[in-house]
Image (cartoon, helix red, strand yellow):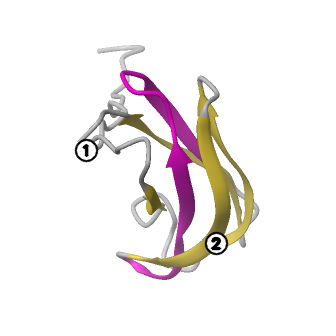
Amino acid sequence: MSGAFATNPTPVLTAKDPYDVSVWTFDFTNTLGPNDTVALIAGVSCNPTGLGIGASAIVNGVGGASKAVSALLSNGVIGVKYLVTCDILTTNGNDYSRSFILPVQKR
């Protein structure tokens, strides 16, 4: 079919408690080529605001060294679903984004 394209839905992760402070990972393994790695974290953000975003780091992904980003997330408002996005630049000069939906609820 001309003009058609496939999209991957944004994954919805298991809810976090508003008092949890934990590390969440964005794995770019399936996007990066075998000789490409994460060179720079351009940013980690959320929409709407209200989720605490702490330190982020380049870490090993499923596919090897420097293929993922971890970010420390905290707080949040009960009942809100946050779109959390990580933007990176790679050693081959590409830029990519990964997102997930993170619901916040009392556990």
In the rendered image, the quadrant that contains the N terminus is top left
Q: Main secondary structure of the magenta part?
A: strand
Residue 36 visible in the current orientation: no
Q: Position of residue 58 (x, y in %)?
A: 61, 74
Point 25% across, 44% down: residue: 14
Q: Secondary structure at mark 1?
A: loop
Left or right: where does residue 78 sit relative to residue 86?
Answer: left
Span highlighted in magenta in the image: 63-86
**Label 1 belongs to which residue?**
14
The amino acid sitting under disc 1 is: Thr
Q: Is residue 82 left or right of residue 35?
A: left
Which is in the foreground here, disc 2 or disc 1? 1
Q: Is residue 3 visible?
A: yes
Q: Amino acid at mark 2?
A: Ala
How many neighbours does mark 2 have within 10 angstroms: few (below 14), some (14-19), or many (20 or more)? some
* Count of numbered circles in the view: 2
Q: Residue 25's x, y, as percent?
A: 45, 62
Disc 1 crowd rating (10 Å Cα; few below 14, some 14-19, many 20+) is few
Q: Nearer the viewer, residue 9 or 85?
A: 85
Image mark for residue 57: 2
